[in-house]
Image (tube, grey):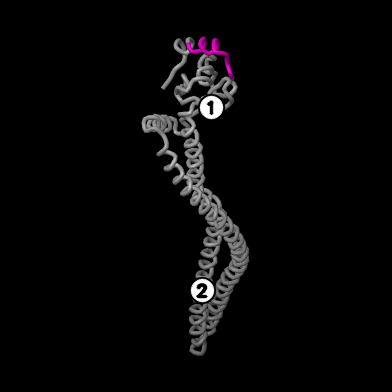
Amino acid sequence: MSQKLVPLVALQKLDLRIMEIKDQRRKIPERLNVAEAPLREQTQLLSETQAAVDLLIKERRGHEKDLEAHEAQTEKMKSHAASLKTNKEYQAHLFEIELANKKRGEFEEKILLSMEKIEQLQQTVKEAQEKADAARKIFTEEKKVLDQQDQVLAKELAKLEAQQAEAAVLIDKNLLARYNQIKTAKKEQALAAVRDGMCAGCRLQIPPQLIAQVKRSDDLHVCPYCRRMLYWEGEVPVESPSALSEAKKKDLEVGESV
């Protein structure tokens, strides 16, 4: 590997890990939102069911008030029985009492039906509350895990950023600027190893002559396709003086340097 790239490779390892940590931390709120979804769903169901119960209770009380008013009116009507003078008037009075009793039965039936519905919904509320409590417990545990994970990542990030600043100082300013330019353009790594005859960055085949240059030369070379700086990870082969001379002639004809 070119000695010029050794500190850059070290810097890139730091940069990639820093980007990975930032990406993980950026996803934590989304993971929290997903983890909280069941709790929100159960809480909403509980709220809607409780609201339905409250509405039925209000409806039942309305029926009870109507029944009370009807009872008072019926009692008032019954008190007039003594003032009736004819049989016809009395028969009419009995008919009115009969209608009033029927109306009373309707009110009582409405009250009973409301009470049955309330009882059923209250059971649903109880079940919804249990599910909401269970969902809250699961979410609380998940949030605790994610909060701890975020704290660990934050500490590691601070440490790596300090190392990143220290590593950048050791690199030539022009080379560092070139590295940052490529990194910004690619949104990822600016350096790419040569592996199996390919650029590890774009996964395209590199001309053999360029591979040879990357292996032997201390100059900087870039991938002709993705423009990343190339480096050789393996050992540089030992060549005879005559072979080296021939290689240098070829280097003047082919290859690309920064």
Residue 86 belongs to the span the image colors magenta: no
Q: Is residue 241 left or right of residue 168?
A: right
Image quadrant where residue 241 sits: top right
- The answer to whether the residues at label 1 and label 2 have Cβ atoms under 8 Å apart is no
Q: Which residues are magenta?
A: 238-248
Amino acid type at mark 2: Arg
User: What is the number of the mark on residue 228?
Assistant: none
Residue at numbered disc 2: 61
Question: Residue 86 appears at what percent x and percent y?
Answer: 51, 85
Task: Decide if residue 188 is in sight here.
Answer: no
Q: Who's the residue at 49% across and 32% down the image?
A: 6
**Dot label at residue 193:** 1
Q: Quadrant of residue 99?
A: bottom right
Quadrant for the C terminus in the image: top left
* In the displayed structure image, the side of residue 152 where residue 164 appears, left or right: left
Residue 30 location (% of width, % of height): 50, 48
